[in-house]
Image (cartoon, grey):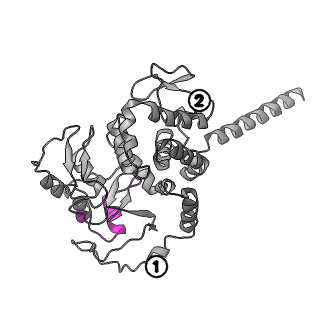
Amino acid sequence: MKFLKQTTYILVLILTLSAFETVAQTRQTREEYIDKYKHIAIEHMERYGIPASITLAQGILESDSGNSNLARRSNNHFGIKCKSNWTGQRVYHTDDAPDECFRKYDSVEESYEDHAEFLDQSPRYDSLFAYSSSDYRSWARGLKAAGYATAPDYAQRLTRIIEENLLFLFDEDNGAELYAARMRAERGRVDDEFASQSSVDMPQTVEGGIDPNRYRVPERTYNGYSVYANNGVHYVVARDGDSFARIAQTFALTERTLRKWNEINPKSEADPVAGEWIYIEQKQSKWQGKGSSHRVATGETLTSIAQEYGIREKRLRSMNRLKSGAALVEGQMLKLN
């Protein structure tokens, strides 16, 4: 009897611990993360001038929407390291190097506050505050140029997160209301609605692909892909395990055409990586948005810049009188139009 009670106790204990472990391992979605911290981001935009979209995008990227090991252990949602002037709590985590020192906070809200003060008080970020709080692209490029992160495509990652999740709406007046209204509208749509509401007549698969002048894709989902626009050109974001063949088939293109539009050698067998922008139309000959030049950051290539702005690489090279294969230099200014 005593053995039976002990066994029962142990089983209950195991089940309880398993339940706690399951709860602890439950991943927070991006939508949940945005809903939880959007008001802090908006408040900091009003107080410091940092775009709410940038704050949320950095939080999502640096903390994996609050799911990363560092975020769970330390409430550090922005990957801010200790530095010599940090006197608060600390935790050690392997990032660019083993066992690096990161700031630890009592709450996520405290991490958000420190992030705003970190940008506001560090001279290296002074140039960012010359940009409007609605100019998230310049802020993203400025953060990368100032050395916030080492990833060469950091600015592009932030921009993708902002545009995929409509975070730019938070940079507007009444941004929270605009975002909520847009989310209600998005939830009411289904994939099949694209075909019934679009004026698109899907063409046959031909070498020329979709005629950009006839193909007008709304910013919604189609066959599981979210379709976005950059510089007036539509693109999708590659998912895990995606291939050019699959994306091409989905949008009635040949794989060769799709690779060509994305500056990939048609004979290459390489497939896109998750998160990569894949244009489903021919890119523009020049940038049509704000600004007329781009300052090259560490690790950027002419191809990556052409993808970021939705410009054909050949045209970008021609505008800047660059020879084929010429290496770019950090700080170099490139014309965009």
Q: Secondary structure at mark 1?
A: helix
Q: Residue at x 39, y 62 (%)?
A: 228
Q: Position of residue 241 (x, y in %)?
A: 39, 53
Residue 252 in sight in this render: yes
Q: Residue at x 11, y 49 (%)?
A: 324
133 or 323, which is in the foreground?
133
Q: Which residues are magenta?
A: 238-257
Name the image quarter holding residue 145.
top left
| Location of residue 100 (image quadrant) | top left
Name the residue tied to disc 2: 105
Residue that mark 1 sits on: 197
Image side of residue 225 versus residue 187, left or right:
left
Q: Is residue 180 magenta?
A: no
How many labels, in total?
Answer: 2
With respect to residue 199, does 284 lie above or below? Answer: above
Disc 1/disc 2 C-alpha distance (Å): 49 Å
Which residue corresponds to the image point at 58% horizontal and 60% vertical from the top-left? 177
**Residue at image x 44%, y 62%?**
226
- Mark 2, secondary structure of its residue: loop
Q: Could you tell me which quadrant the C terminus lies in? A: bottom left
| Residue 252 covered by magenta stretch | yes
Q: Is residue 33 visible?
A: no
Q: Residues within 10 Å of mark 1 (few under 14, many from 20)?
A: few
Q: Position of residue 294 (x, y in %)?
A: 25, 48
Identify which amino acid the numbered label 1 is placed on. Gln
In front of the other: label 1 or label 2?
A: 2
Where residue 78 sits in the image (x, y, percent)?
49, 36
> Would you place residue 103 above or below residue 193 in this image?
above
Query: 117 left or right of 253?
Result: right
Q: Which of the image's four quarters has the N terminus?
A: top right
